Image (cartoon, rainbow, N blue to C red):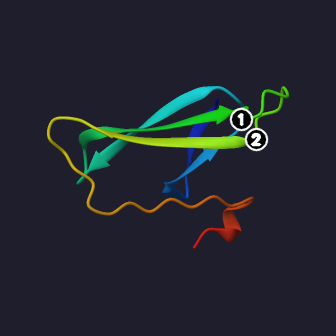
């Protein structure tokens, strides 16, 4: 899976192929607090990925008290 960030909004992550991939969760300005992983899943074994699994994993005693996740077909549709 290709994962990249939108240069005009670094909080927007773009997923553009299938496979598993992760991006770092950054606390403050530059502290790696974990990772956010994306995985396309074929839930009914018909050969087509029909679910996106998103997993938040924190490291070094970091905890998430609130997380926001949004999927949209185009940048202009992000809140």
53 is higher (above) or lower (below) than 2? below
- Seen at 35% across and 44% down, the residue is 25
- Seen at 38% across and 60% down, the residue is 67
The numbered mark at residue 50 is 2
Decide which of tag 2 and tag 1 comes sooner along the chain. 1
Asked whether the beta carbons under mark 2 and mark 1 sit within 8 Å of each other, the answer is yes
Residue 52 x/y as whole percent = 64, 43
Judge the density around disc 2: few (<14), some (14-19), many (≥20) Cα neighbours within 10 Å. few
Left or right: 10 in relation to 19? left
In-front residue for pair 79/68? 68
Image quarter (top left, top right, bottom left or bottom right) of the C terminus: bottom right
Left or right: 50 in relation to 66? right
Residue 3 x/y as whole percent = 58, 36
- Seen at 26% across and 61% down, the residue is 65
- Seen at 54% across and 29% down, the residue is 21
13 is higher (above) or lower (below) than 4? below
Residue 40 x/y as whole percent = 66, 34
Judge the density around disc 1: few (<14), some (14-19), many (≥20) Cα neighbours within 10 Å. few
In-front residue for pair 49/44? 44
67 is higher (above) or lower (below) than 37? below
Q: Point out the residue furthest to the left here.
A: 61
- Residue placed under numbered mark 1 in the picture: 43
In-front residue for pair 74/43? 43
Residue 13 x/y as whole percent = 55, 48
Q: Separation of disc 2 and disc 1 at Cα?
A: 6 Å
Q: What element carries label 2?
A: loop
Q: Name the image quarter holding residue 2.
A: top right
């Amino acid at each position: 899976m290709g994962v990249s960030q939108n240069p005009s909004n670094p909080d927007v992550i773009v997923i553009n192929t299938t496979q598993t991939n992760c991006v770092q969760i950054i606390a403050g300005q530059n502290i790696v607090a974990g990772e956010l992983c994306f995985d396309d899943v074929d839930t009914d074994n018909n050969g087509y990925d029909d679910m996106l699994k998103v997993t938040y994993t924190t490291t070094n005693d970091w905890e998430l008290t609130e997380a926001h996740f949004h999927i949209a077909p185009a940048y202009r549709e992000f809140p």
